[in-house]
Every structure is written in structure tokens, then in C-alpha cells.
Amino acid sequence: MNEFNLPRFKGGIAFKTTLTLEELGDIISNKIFAGAKFGGKDQHIYEEIPAVFIMLFGWQLILQQGDTDSNKVTNYVLDLFQFSPVPNYDNKIHLNSYMEYIFIEKLKDIPEIEVIGVPVM
């Protein structure tokens, strides 16, 4: 069997909004992921951090809730991971800038969502 040297992709984007995790997930689902629904909140994939996810063609997209300030504005992070049998090679490709462009463009007509850029990873 031939060995392939495939890249490993990952990325992330951060948001601020007064929307709930589920509301934000529904908007992202409809605007960016062709209606693929986030789910799995009851699976507690990040233990005590509320999170939902989509498994899509070898990718895992995890939307997780962060801190809420006194104005009820909550920080959220969407992480994208390659979730497939591709080995973990050193040649990782970060999609942060690409994701930031796509999310800013697709969510620009939703004033309740502020795309704040790339999360600290």
C-alpha cells in the first residue's frame, strides 16, 4: 500500500452575540453549512462547557459557548477539525483566515452576530 503525505487541516473563528448557543448554531447552519444541523449538546463533549457539533464529510465542527458579560453578550468559538483516518502529519494547514473571510461575508446581514476573528489556539 502506498503511503500518502496528506495535510491535516484545522481552523477556528470566534463570535460575540446575545443569541443562545442553539440560535447561533441554527444561523451558522443555514448560512454556511447548507442546513446541516448542530446537535449533541447532551453528549457534553467538552464536559462543563456547553457545545454542539456537526460531523460532515470527515470534518468535525464544534461550536462552544464561552463567557457572558454583564450586558448578556456571550463569546463563542467554532473549531474545525479533520476527523478522519488521515494520520497526524506535521504539515498542518490552518484555515483561520479563510474561515474568517467566509463567516464575515455570510453573516454580515445579521447584526446580532459579531465575528471577532481567530480564537487563541
Image: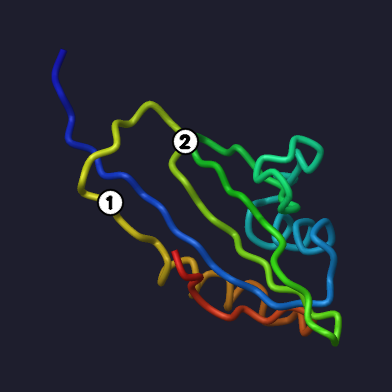
- As drawn, the label of residue 83 is 2
Q: Nearer the viewer, residue 102 or 12?
A: 12
Using the rendered image of the protein, determine whether residue 35 is visible from the camera's viewpoint.
Answer: no
Q: Residue at x 71, y 55 (%)?
A: 29
**Element on which disc 1 rests:** strand
Figure quadrant of the N terminus: top left
Amino acid type, label 1: Lys
Q: Residue at x 58, y 77 (%)?
A: 105
Amino acid type, label 2: Phe
Q: Residue at x 71, y 50 (%)?
A: 51
Left-right relation of 100 to 89: right
* Residue 27 in picture, x, y percent from top left: 77, 63
* Residue 8 in picture, x, y percent from top left: 32, 44
* Residue 103 in picture, x, y percent from top left: 58, 71
Q: Which residue is mark 1?
A: 92
Return the residue found at the far left: 2
The CA span between labels 2 and 1 is 14 Å
